[in-house]
Amino acid sequence: MLKLGKKSLLSHFSQRVPSLDGGIVSDTPSNALNPSQSPDYTNFRIYRGRLQKRDGFSRIGQAGLRAVMYTGIFYRRNAVTQNVIITDRKLHRDDGTDWIEVGGTDLTGDESNLFSVATAQDKLCFTNGVDTIRTWTGASGDSQVGEAGTSAPGTARYLISFANRLVTLRTTEGGAVYKQRGRWTIDGPALTNNNADWANTGSGSADMFDSEDDIQNGMLSQDTLVVYRERSIYHWNRTGRATAPFAISLHDSKEGLLAPFTLVDLGGIHFFMGNRNIYLYDRANRK
């Protein structure tokens, strides 16, 4: 039982609770409790021996939306930030009052097609693994990264911004799915949304055929891109060479990522669900 003197829980104040080792008194009817006592509480939490009022929430916008698949913040080079959400059909931006639909062709995936999002070369890039990769500058309508030739991926399952490039993993090119491929753009000031991004010097692709397992996800750990496959883990490191920007090497051939979206980054250290356990990975060791 929490005793707060003569003050009611309806007041907004913090009160030190000396000890909580007495347990909860459950044999006294609630209508027989002293006004300064309570069998339960709502919108409060016990933190460091104090009873604190829980912070509230406010609704952003009033528009009725379809299934929201992603929420995040788009950070631009000019220091402007933009709250965004992506539904199963459209990208929306927050104008301070409501969610405004960004122009562009409707997406065609459903609620099972989760999104991968990256900010690369000052553009918000996103894919659901079904539709053509989309980009947005933060100003006009979204654009498709067009499949103008064999060098451009139609879509991809995962997007990562690395070495000033947009890196795509598990791509679909010309209608064919490449589950062991990574493809990257040129090292350029901005994506132009045409085939030159994927064909000019500095762009390229790599098929990781060292093992037969598929790519499951990828995530940065300091200056290394760690690519997780079903039963192995690869490292992508910068080389400093324009024509061959990445050195790709196998670092773990005994374990991989079982569930793609269980991969979590905490300060450069990754946690993920493997085939036999839940692991911590710090680029050097899997624990």
Image (cartoon, grey):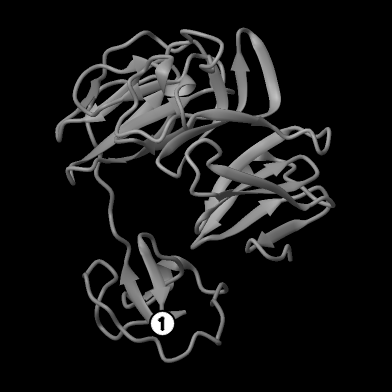
Q: In the rendered image, which residue does mark 1 sit on? A: 48
- Could you tell me if residue 284 is visible in this image? yes
Q: Residue at x 77, y 40 (%)?
A: 230
Q: Which of the 4 quarters of the picture holds residue 231?
A: top right
Q: Nearer the viewer, residue 15 or 105?
A: 105
Tell me where residue 184 appears, x and y as whole percent.
51, 31
Q: Nearer the viewer, residue 198 or 169?
A: 198
When asked about the image quadrant of residue 138, the answer is: top left
Check disc 1 and report its element: helix, strand or loop.
loop
Residue 156 vs residue 101, the one in the foreground: 156
Residue at 52% x, 60% y: name it.
268
Q: Position of residue 59 (x, y in %)?
A: 25, 39
* 216 sits left or right of 87 in the view: right
The structure residue drawn at horizontal position 56% and vertical position 47%, both measured from the top left corner, is 219
Left/right placement of residue 1 relative to residue 285 reads: left
Tell me if I can see residue 110 in this picture: no
Residue 281 drawn at (x, y percent): 66, 60
If the image is split into quadrants, where does the C terminus sit?
bottom right
For label 1, count other residues whose C-alpha is less than 10 Å away and answer few (under 14), some (14-19) or many (20+): few
Badge 1 amino acid: Arg
Residue 190 lies, with reference to residue 20, above or below; the image says above
Location of residue 123 in the rendering, given as x and y in whole percent from the top left corner? 31, 31
Foreground residue among 132 and 277 = 132
Residue at the limit of the structure toward the bottom, as seen here: 18
Q: Quadrant of residue 119?
A: top left
State how many labels appear. 1
